[in-house]
Amino acid sequence: MDDVQTRFRQFLFLDRKRGTSGLTPDELRRWMKLKRILNQHFSPNASYERVDRRESVRVPARLSVEFRDEGELRACLMTNLSRGGLFVETDKPCEIGTRLELVLRVEAGGEDLDVPAEVVSINARPDSAVPQHGMGLRFLEMKPDVAEKVEAWYQRKLQEAVGGSPRSRGEEDYGRFLCPQLG
């Protein structure tokens, strides 16, 4: 697991730099390689072609998600999360192009987040060669405070997926490094 954690830390450093000052060509190649490795770690059945198209690492995350569809309140199970969206399992996916207002309860007892999303795929879970009932949702433009909370939640899920709390490893600034907008 240390190898994955090391690659994860390298990826985070480059990912953060990519979003601020930009990457050199060598750093960009390294970022792409690390992104591929981490995506393959979390989604071993996904093809390289699919993994390489992703803008961010897709991590396993299970959460009940609610939304209204034609006036009916529906609940689904989210099975993975990325910076750009999520996948939910459902036997009744909406049509591609359908816009939804998702309600995410990120933490038990915490506030609900209203997140606008659009259906971009149906019945094809992106990390599996076997089609599954569900739909891929892309996040649409969010209010800044909601976007910050979703990003912080994504960073926590990514961190959990590669092995635990950074504070337990004595990296005092690691939390601020993961979520600079919160530090």
Image: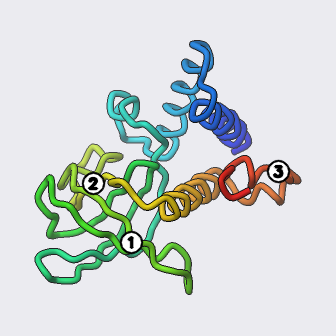
* Residue at numbered disc 1: 114
Q: Secondary structure at mark 1?
A: strand
Image location of residue 32, percent across then percent down: 51, 26
User: Which corner quadrant holds the C terminus?
Assistant: bottom right
Contact, mark 3 vs mark 1 (Cβ under 8 Å): no
Which quarter of the figure has residue 74? bottom left
Residues at marks 3 and 2, CA–CA distance in whole angstroms: 34 Å
Residue at point 49%, 43% (across, down): 57
Residues at marks 1 and 2, CA–CA distance in whole angstroms: 17 Å
Which quarter of the figure has residue 27? top right
Tell me the kind of residue under disc 3.
Asp
Q: Is residue 3 above or below residue 123?
A: above
Counting residues from the start of the chain, the first of labels 3 and 2 encountered is: 2
User: Which corner quadrant holds the N terminus?
Assistant: top right
Nearer to us in this view, 76 or 17: 17
Q: Which mark is residue 136?
A: 2
Tell me the kind of residue under disc 2.
Gly
Q: Is residue 166 above or below residue 93?
A: above
Image location of residue 115, percent across then percent down: 37, 65
Image location of residue 110, percent across then percent down: 55, 81
Tell me the kind of residue under disc 1.
Asp
Nearer to us in this view, 158 or 40: 158
Residue at point 52%, 41% (across, down): 41
Residue at point 46%, 77% (across, down): 105
Horizontal side of 83 relative to 177 (left or right) equals left
* Residue at numbered disc 3: 173
Counting residues from the start of the chain, the first of labels 3 and 1 encountered is: 1
